[in-house]
Structure formats: C-alpha cells, structure tokens
Amino acid sequence: MRTISFDGVIVGGGGAGMRAALQLAQSGYKTAVISKVFPTRSHTVSAQGGITCAIASADPQDDWRWHMYDTVKGSDYIGDQDAIEYMCSVGPEAIFELEHMGLPFSRTEEGRIYQRPFGGQSKNFGEGGQAARTCAAADRTGHALLHTLYQNNVKNETVFFNEWFATDLVKNQDGAIVGVIAICIETGETVYVKCKATVFATGGAGRIYASTTNAHINTGDGVGMALRADVPVQDMEMWQFHPTGIYGAGTLVTEGCRGEGGYLINADGERFMERYAPNAKDLAGRDVVARSMVLEILEGRGCGPDGDHVKLKLDHLGEEVLESRLPGICELSRTFAHVDPVKEPIPVVPTCHYMMGGITTNIHGQALTVDAAGNDQVIPGLYACGEVACVSVHGANRLGGNSLLDLVVFGRASGLFIEDALRQGIEMRDASMTDIESANERLVSLNERNDGENVSALRKELQGVMQNYFGVFRKGEFMQEGIKKLDDLKERINNVKLADKSNAFNTARVECLELQNLFETAEATAIVAEARKESRGAHAREDFTERNDDEWLCHSIYHREGRAVSKRSVNFAPRTVDTFQPKVRTY
Amino acid sequence: MLRVSVYRFNPETDANPQMQEYQVETGGRDLMVLDVLEMIKAEHDASVTYRRSCREGVCGSDGLNINGKNGLACITPLSDAVKNDKLVVRPLPGLPVVRDLVVDMSLFYAQYEKIEPYLQNSSPAPAIERLQTPEDRAKLDGLYECILCACCSTSCPSFWWNPDRFVGPAGLLQAYRFLADSRDQATDDRLAKLDDPFSVFRCHGIQNCVNVCPKGLNPTRAIGHIRTMLLKRAA
C-alpha cells in the first residue's frame, strides 16, 4: 500500500473541514482535505436560514452574552459553558472574516449584514423579547458559505483529494492517531495517508433514520471510524428533529420561514403553538415545536386524509417577501410538496435533522476520551470539528443558526491550534505494518467476502428500526425491543455483501462501508437513549417525562467496547461571565 | 412499469458503452428521476453508477442528460422527463466518461478556477463587515446561486468544441458574479485575463445554458454584460 504524507489531514470538505483547511493552508504547513464528494456537494450546502451571531446589525445593542444565554438554555443546560462562551464571543470575528472573503450576505438599508429572528432567541437574557440574530444570505446561507470557503481554499491552493473515501483511522502502538486509510473512488486505489494531525470534519449521520432532511452522504463516517478505533462518543441520544421537513419528501423548510412571520396550523386551522409556548409561539426551541406537532397529530388534529402532518402557513406574508427573503423555499415547496407557498400552506412534519452528539472535544478541537477515574484525556493526533464533534455547544438541543456558527468557529479554532502545535513540533511514532493492516482489515474483509445480504435492504431495515423505536418520543420497553432488532442486524451488516468488486468509481463499495458507519452511529444512539432515564432537550421519554438534574445534568459517554455508558461532567465555568444556572426551560 | 434505459460503461470490463434497459415498478407515482435510479441500484443492479448527495437540487451532484435534456435527476419529475413511456438517462455530454453516468469534470472545474472565483480586495478590512447597499447586493442575485452542476457548460456547443479555451457558461457566470460585486477591486485585471478570442467571445448566444439551468439562472445575459465591459474597455 502506498503511503502519502502530510502535516495535517482534514477528513471532510464541508464547512468545518474547509474552514480548518483554510487556516492550515494559510499557515504554510502541508495540508490536505480528503472529501468523499467534491467539496461544494457537502451537506453544509443545504443550510438555509442563516448563521446566528451577535454582530449587532439588526440591534446595535445586541450582546454575545445574550446569545450565550439563549444557547445554554436551548441546550437544556448540558451545553458546555466554556465552549458556548468561546463560540458566541469569537463568533462576530469569524462572521466578519467570511464577509471579507466575499460571502454574499443579504443587506440592511444601512449596508450591514441582514439578520432575521430565529427560534429560541432573546434579548437581555430572556427578558427583552424576541431577538433577530441570524445572519442570512436569503435562504441559501449554507450554499453561500460553502462556496465562499471553497473559493478561498482555491485562492490559497489547498490540496484536495476529492472523491476519496476515508475508511478507518490508523493508530500507532502508543494509541496515537497517525492518519487514515483512504480509497480513491475513481481508481479504487487504497492508500495510507500519514499525518501528524487528523481532523475529522465528517458531518452528521441523519441517514440512520428513514425520514431525514440530511443528504444521502450523511452516514456518520467519523463516528463509525472513531468508535472502531476505541474513541468514545458523547450525547449520542440527542438527535434534533426539525419541525418543518416537507411531508413525504423530508426536505428541509427553514426555521427562517417562521422567523419571517410564518406559523404552523393544525387541521382546524388553529395556530396551535400559542397553546404550547405562549410567549415564543412558533419560535420556541426546535425540540419544543417538534413535540407539540407530534402531540397535535396524535390527538387527532393532524392534516390530510391520514391526519399525519400539520401545515406551515406563509401566504399572508405576501409574494414580495416570499420571493425576496425565501426564494429557495418557494422553489423547494413547488418541487417537492407541489404547493405554491404564496397561495397555500406547506405540509410539514418533524424530520431528523441534526446530531447534537459526536466525538468529545475541547475548544481547540482536540478529541478527548475519559479515563477510568473520569478525567478527560487528549487523544494524540485526533481532532474533530463541526457536526461530528461534540464540543459541546448544543447540549441536548441545538438552536437554529448555531450549527453554521459552530462549524466556522471551531473549524477555525482547530486550524489555529494545530498550526501552533505543528510549530512547536509534534513527535509521534510511525505506524507499524501491523497497525496499518489492522486499520485496513474491514475493507479487505468486505472485498474478499462473496456472500451476505444486499446493502440497500439492510440499510432500509436499519432506518426503519431507528425511526420506529428512537424517534421524537421514546419509551424504555420500546427501546429495548429496538436494541434487540439492532442486535439482529449487527452481524448481518458486518457481513454485508459487496455485489460489485470492480475498481473504477465503485459506489457500491462506498455504500457498504457507509452502512457499517451508520450502524455504529445507530447502535450508540440506541444504547445511550435507553440509558438516559429522563427527558431533556431532544430526548423525550414517555416513561421518564421530567428532567432529572440530580442524576442526569451531565453528558453521556458511549464506549463501543462492551457498549458501556458512563457520565461526564458538563462545564459550568465560563471564563468571563457568571455561570448560567439551570432553570425550568419554558418559551 | 416504466422502461428505463441507462448508459453503461465500465472501463475495466467494457470495450464500448451500451444502453441497458430496466423495468421499474413506479406504482404510478410521479417520482423524481433520482428516485428511479436509486430503485435500480437497490433492487436491480448495484453496479449502476452515478453521483448524488443532497437530493434537493442544491449540491449539483446529479447533473445528467435525461431524455435528451440536461438537468438534475433529483428535481426532475418523471412527468416532465418521460417521453413515449420511456426514460433515457445518459451522462452529461462532452466530458470524458469515468463510469456509467459519472463524467470526469476536471476540465469544467479548471475553467471555474481560471476565472479566479474569489473576492479580491486589497484595502485593509474594516473591524466589521464591508458595507454594501441592498441595491448593490441585488446585482449578485441570479449569479451567486450557481451550484456547479455543469448542466449548462455541457449543453453548450462552444464548450464542446473548445473546453480548454472557452471558459463556458458556468465559469463566465461566476466571472460576472465577481465583476458585479461592489466589494471586488480586480475588475480591470479580471477583464484583461478574459480579453482574448476564446475565453468569452466563443459564446454564440445559443442559449442552451439558459434553457437547461436547474436553478433558473441566465449565463447568456451575464456573458453579454462581460462582452459589453470588454468592448468598453477596448474603446
């Protein structure tokens, strides 16, 4: 197997990966990005409504501490306050950098960046009413951001390995991460990519569910690779169901629709969020809105012949607002719902959207594990940022507009830290032949196996189990049943059949490897969801309906070995502001 | 049952490409073309190869030639595409085929990179954003939304003839996106680099690009603006 060497290798060419790459490329260190798709095809491109940050455009008095308060509350108090403080305070600088790079933000009359209201936003620590803090490029903010980052990487001559797929981490005898095994999809060649810093920016894994807003490529590759290398993952029970996925298709309709004045209605035409969240109404936290929608449906007030969805009303905003502020939504709705939002409401249903959990990191992107005594230990050589990381700024529920900020701020922070570490010198022992072979074992066994089941059928079965047993509302006995079904799937997925053994652009091989990553992600989710016996944020249990701060005001940590679950403390020690103490969370 | 004919070519085993036919049970639903390809790959033949990612028309992965017209498989419904009860899917024309429906896009990307697709502004950046009026920002609408799917450039006869020298509609749309940006200071340099007989002037106003753009953008109009700027500069 050929070896290629770099100082830093970033796995994933979405927003986080390209922001980290940009930082490293500018530093002069030998950097490469491995992306399984051409970078602008990454899922960041689908982000619509915007990037939340206190840049004080819509409100000159706006304050990053108010943003921090909202984010801590939104996280249902298991977001780490040092990380949230870092994100909210550094955010404006990171946004202005993007604008200087050319990101075509929408503008106010004063020529500043346009900001719109989003869910869970407030002024003055929840006392001053709804804020408008989400910076937007119409409803195509992710597209504008991703293309701007790609363009600036072109400018800085970053080395891209596009349409290369990383299969597994390479670990040396000291347990340090010293690169990855990767396949060039076009030729089928397998290579050991050796480096001193491996940055996972592999994004989410929404494809573990049958109904998701996520792209086909969101298959939890980083989570799968981490778990197989004995790197634990954190808060995997926390999955965000976005209130407004288009009924039937799953495609996303931005929260910005409700920010611009749209609202949800049930079969009676009632604006039901007024009952569930009297103050914030349709702009309550996403977990709150999604649950309210499901309750409306369960109580028989759903729309359509099967009463299985609700509707998002926008027509009262008028054609001009819709075409200028939400042009992409009009397009998506006409294509996928066959509904013109200028005239009729859009049928919507809560749809899996975002993985709050992931690889535990500190604010520098360094991956962490927890030792037997419960102390954080840095995993040498491994970093993570963006959706695959759990730093954790989102805790049990992410606020809309915070994912783009997360990936920009922590992509940047990882790059800055690695640059510094490289400058100081990183010494790691080389991987032995055995280390490399052991990392390549999964791929070799897939290539050599001639029996097994069809990848599509197995994937469909897995997605069905997750959808049915680990959805918006969860219950112990159902989850235990779901875990049994996963147990049955485990060996079958490990032994999936690769029907096509050819080398050139073999997407069947990639799909098999992705399916195994989906399974690792799903299993972690299932085990931890069953273990967390309370309701918090996105994790809502019918058998434990209350938040239990005495036992569960903490992160969950999942170890693949023995499927063990442990607890990790939440950070309540921001550096420059007072701690936000847990309170009852109402909107 | 829908008759689907798919272009197949595996460089490891096939001397020549061929069209392969599948019978797909759509249940009478108005699926998207990508859904049909996914059904073929899942239920008929795992070796059928194509690119796809977002499945909602924003990532630009699945630009294909569908019943003779370039478009994105994920947002082209069968009701728009199917003719005579048959769906014919081929790779985008004019680029080398890697395998089946996957083309080598290197030339397309090279033309994009050639126009220096990034903002150039050498004045010191302010502590906040650079200001831009809503009117100036509106000049970027219809330009920045490009998803680099290559439907336009690969439907352009001028690009088929000179893919190495004619920038093509996608690249030129982005060239104009930066020429039109009030924050960009490299106008003269950008125009100088485009001022030759091939880069821009190979556009003959055929407008296939406008006809196929899945985002409803108008590269011909942008190219017209660049021509005018080039002519004014020469005068």
Image (cartoon, coloured by chain):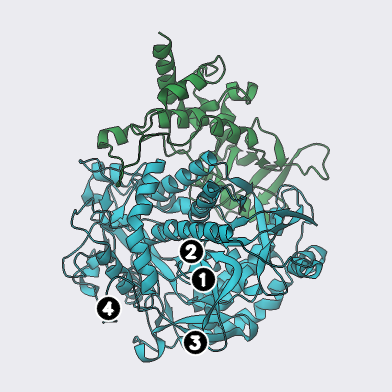
Q: Quadrant of residue A377?
A: bottom right
> Which residue is under mark 2?
A387
Q: Which mark is residue A358?
A: 1
Q: Which mark is first along the chain, 3 or 4?
A: 3
Hue used for the chain lettered A: cyan
Q: Residue at x 40, y 21 (%)?
A: B225
Q: Cα distance, mark 3 to mark 1?
A: 17 Å
Q: Residue at x 77, y 52 (%)?
A: A189
> Which residue is under mark 3?
A531
Q: Which mark is first along the chain, 4 or 2?
A: 2
> Which residue is under mark 4?
A585
Hue used for the chain lettered B: green
In the image shown, does A387 or B159 lie closer to the viewer?
A387
Element type where label 1 sits in the image: strand
Q: Cα distance, mark 4 to mark 3?
A: 22 Å
Q: Position of residue A534 (x, y in %)?
A: 40, 86
